[in-house]
Amino acid sequence: GGAVNSGVRAPASRSPGSEPAKSGPGPAASTRELEHLTAVIQALPERSRQVLTLRKIYGLSQREIAVRLGIEERAVEAHLADGMRRCIELLGVRSP
């Protein structure tokens, strides 16, 4: 399958003091989070990864995904639910 992170690059390093101070996690934390999310998505079964990527990253409708992949809309729905459930488990997200 295709790599989800193709074309994604880490931010260029900057000299100290070249950015205004920010509250919250810095760019290094954001980069780590993005790398972790990418690894989680790549760990999904191929069809779930394809459906999740087409839906959540490219914004295709379930019908468009079904046509593109040659599967039924019910299958798109099932793969999307499976992919989301696995991502939540692998990311350790807890509901409030």
Image: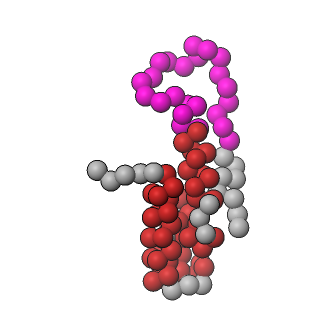
Question: Horizontal and vertical percent for residue 61?
Answer: 46, 72
Q: Specify the farthest residue to the left.
A: 96
Q: How is the image coloured?
A: secondary structure
Could you tell me how many numbered marks the image carries? 0
Name the foreground residue: 59 vs 2: 2
User: What residue is drawn where x is 47% and y is 30%?
Assistant: 25
Question: Horizontal and vertical percent for residue 28?
Answer: 58, 31
User: What residue is drawn where x is 45% and y is 76%?
Assistant: 77
Q: Quadrant of the N terminus?
A: bottom right
- Is 59 placed above or below 15 here? below
- Is 1 placed above or below 31 here? below
User: What residue is drawn where x is 62% and y is 53%?
Assistant: 39
Q: Is residue 24 magenta?
A: yes
In terms of image quadrants, where is residue 30?
top right
What type of secondary structure mainly makes up the magenta span? loop
Q: Is residue 51 left or right of residue 6?
A: left
| Res 61 visible | no
Q: Is residue 7 magenta?
A: no
Question: Horizontal and vertical percent for residue 20?
Answer: 49, 18
Q: Is residue 70 left or right of residue 21?
A: right
Question: Horizontal and vertical percent for residue 60?
Answer: 50, 68
| Res 48 visible | yes
The residues colored magenta run 9-31
